[in-house]
Amino acid sequence: MKPNDPRVPDHEVDWSLTTWEGVRKEQMRRWAQLPLERAIMALEEMEEIARAFQGGGDRAIERHRELVRNPVSRMGLKGFDHGT
């Protein structure tokens, strides 16, 4: 493989994460590691997205794009680091 090749060799892949059960466990593990502020922010964002999609159509799509572009400033959290 080339030095900048994004592929991971098979022997380095955790294949247990490629099943439905494995993916769900990994999601729960990552969710449990979130700081409380991030978890609350994620829940509020999911709620807003759900409300936007209840209206349907182009308005819902545009609202989702707006939330994705700027999730922190809409909550008034100046300087909040929302990295992964």
Image (spheres, rainbow, N blue to C red):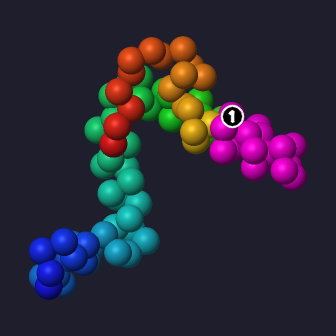
Is residue 44 positioned above or below 52 on the image? above
Residue that label 1 marks = 48
Closest to the observer: 70 or 35? 70
Residue 13, visible in the rendered structure: no
Is residue 58 positioned above or below 83 on the image? below
Asked whether 21 falls inside the magenta stretch, the response is no
Is residue 19 positioned above or below 59 on the image? below
- The percent position of residue 58, horizontal first and vertical second, equals 84, 50
Judge from the rendering whether residue 48 lies leftward or rightward of residue 8; answer left or right: right
Is residue 10 positioned above or below 44 on the image? below
Classify mark 1: residues with Cα within 10 Å, few (<14), some (14-19) or many (20+): some
Judge from the rendering whether residue 3 lies leftward or rightward of residue 7; answer left or right: left
What residue do we see at 62% from left, 37% from top? 67
* Main SS category, magenta section: helix
Closest to the observer: 23 or 41? 41
Instruction: Count numbered badges in the picture.
Output: 1
- The percent position of residue 4, horizontal first and vertical second, equals 19, 72
What residue do we see at 37% from left, 50% from top? 28
- The percent position of residue 79, horizontal first and vertical second, equals 39, 18
Residue 27 picture quarter: bottom left
Magenta-drawn segment: 48-66
- The percent position of residue 26, horizontal first and vertical second, equals 33, 57
What residue do we see at 33% from left, 42% from top? 84
Judge from the rendering whether residue 77 lies leftward or rightward of residue 8; answer left or right: right
Amino acid carrying label 1: it is Glu
The quadrant of the picture occupied by the N terminus is: bottom left
Disc 1 secondary structure class: helix
Residue 41, visible in the rendered structure: yes
Judge from the rendering whether residue 31 lies leftward or rightward of residue 11; answer left or right: right
Asked whether 56 falls inside the magenta stretch, the response is yes
